[in-house]
Image (cartoon, rainbow, N blue to C red):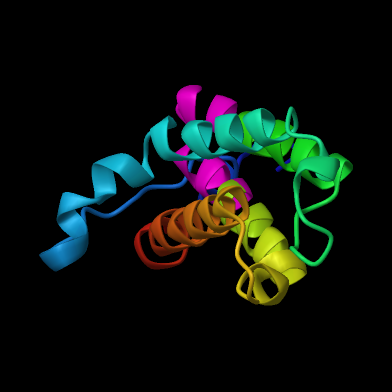
């Protein structure tokens, strides 16, 4: 019995499968499996790293430099995973790190006075969290 493979262990490393969405999300599912939205968000974060914190008024929230650079790298990594064809892990990475950013910066970003770049970063992150989170939690098995 040493060389015999049992059927329940035969496909233990099989890739995950995904379901096709129906309803409203069916129009957005192609974007949830592509690298476009998260790559655009990573580019926005990288571009915001060029803006010095001294440009912003003192009472306006602007994420620290390391957060902007770090999240741009992580979002770029998620885009790479999605481009490699791994929709399960790519959407999971995008969802987890988007929710982390929102946990750290959402409340402060929505306080008056607003800064347009901060609002764009927060809105884009919330949109990516919703898009990739729906794909990850609802349609991946």
Quadrant of the rendered image containing residue 139? bottom left
Q: Is residue 50 above or below residue 110?
A: above
Q: Nearer the viewer, residue 5 or 19?
A: 19
Magenta stretch contains residue 122: no
- Give the tally of numbered discs: 0
- Give the residue drawn at x 83%, y 43%: 53
Tell me the chief SS of the magenta region: helix
Residue 11 seen in the current view: no
In the picture, the quarter occupied by the N terminus is top right
- Give the residue drawn at x 57%, y 51%: 121
Residue 63 seen in the current view: yes
Magenta stretch contains residue 81: yes
Quadrant of the rendered image containing residue 31? top left
Q: Where does the image place residue 30, in percent across and percent down from the top left?
A: 26, 41
Q: Is 112 left or right of 23, judged from the image as shown?
A: right
- Give the residue drawn at x 87%, y 41%: 66
Q: Nearer the viewer, residue 135 or 53?
A: 53
Span highlighted in magenta in the image: 79-93
Q: Is residue 77 above or below residue 7?
A: above
Q: Where does the image place residue 72, in percent across and percent down from the top left?
A: 69, 35
Q: Is residue 63 above or below residue 138?
A: above
Q: Where does the image place residue 13, in percent across and percent down from the top left?
A: 59, 40
Q: Nearer the viewer, residue 38 or 26?
A: 38
């Amino acid at each position: 019995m040493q060389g015999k493979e049992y059927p329940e262990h035969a496909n233990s490393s099989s890739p995950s499968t995904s379901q096709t969405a129906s309803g409203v999300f069916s129009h957005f599912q192609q974007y949830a499996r592509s690298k476009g939205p998260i790559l655009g968000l990573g580019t926005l974060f990288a571009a915001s790293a060029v803006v010095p914190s001294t440009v912003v008024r003192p009472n306006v929230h602007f994420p620290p430099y390391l957060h902007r650079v770090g999240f741009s790298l992580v979002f770029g990594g998620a885009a790479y995973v999605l481009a490699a064809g791994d929709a399960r892990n790519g959407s999971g990475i995008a969802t987890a790190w988007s929710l982390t950013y929102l946990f750290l910066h959402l409340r402060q970003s929505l306080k008056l006075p607003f800064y347009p770049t901060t609002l764009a970063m927060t809105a884009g992150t919330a949109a990516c969290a919703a898009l990739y989170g729906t794909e990850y939690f609802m349609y991946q098995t």
